[in-house]
Amino acid sequence: MPMIHHLQWPPEVLTDAFSVVVDIYSETEGGYDDRGNPLPPLKQYIVQDAPADLQPKSGSQRAVQSATTYEASHTLFIFPSESWPGDLAAPANKGLPADMSWPSTSSGAAIIEAFFGQLAGEIPVGATAEVRQQHGTPRGKFTVVFVASWGTHLELDLKAV
């Protein structure tokens, strides 16, 4: 009987956590140049280069969702990481002026929960989400159809464009 060797893969290869980065933005009309020619739309970024996890929805998930007011092809999860959202995921008072500190009654979890709650309110339905691999290869362009803040992370339902 042949011997099977188990490969030792790094954990980040075996999981999809933070496998992509995402930019989320809204577009507004670009106006016209001095000759009256239309300019391309202007992007107003809400999120840039956030580490995320993109998961396709299964057929049964879509069937359950078909009774809702929207349809989604993917779910995007945005969690705090060491690199995002900047100082919120960093150690205690990093990034604050020397004479300031976070309130002693506020835990890091409460600050992150407040951040994601505010961010969820800033991402409108209809915004564009461009997803790419960590190394820059485009993964897809989506429209945001639903935003949910779970305190510890955001969960966005997306529809492929």
Image (cartoon, grey):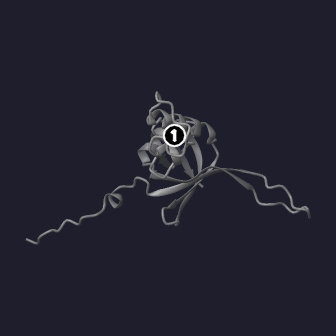
Left-right relation of 109 to 37:
left
Can you say which quadrant of the picture contains the C terminus?
bottom right
Residue 146 visible, this angle: yes
Q: Is residue 65 left or right of residue 16?
A: right
Quadrant position of the N terminus in the picture: bottom left
Query: In this figure, which residue is indicated by the disc labeled 1?
Result: 66
Residue 65 screen position, x and y as percent: 49, 39
Q: Is residue 32 left or right of residue 119?
A: right
Q: Residue placed farthest to the left in the image?
A: 1
Residue 38 picture quarter: bottom right
Q: Residue furthest front?
A: 99
Q: Is residue 85 visible?
A: no
Q: Which residue is located at x 55 percent, y 37 percent?
A: 100
Comparing 118 with 148, the one in front is 118
Residue 143's x, y, as percent? 60, 50
Residue 149, image x and y in percent?
A: 51, 36
Can you name the residue that lies furthest to the right here? Answer: 35
Q: Amino acid at mark 1?
A: Ser
Residue ranking furthest to the top: 105
Question: What element does badge 1 sit on?
Answer: loop
Question: How many numbered marks are there?
Answer: 1
Residue at left offset 42%, top offset 49%: 58
Q: Is residue 155 above or below residue 24?
A: above
Q: Could you tell whether 102 is left or right of 41 in the image?
A: left
Considering depth in this image, is 27 or 114 the residue closer to the camera? 114
**Which residue is depicted at the point 51% across and 56% down?**
21
Residues 55 and 23: in front is 23
Q: Residue at x 48, y 62 (%)?
A: 134
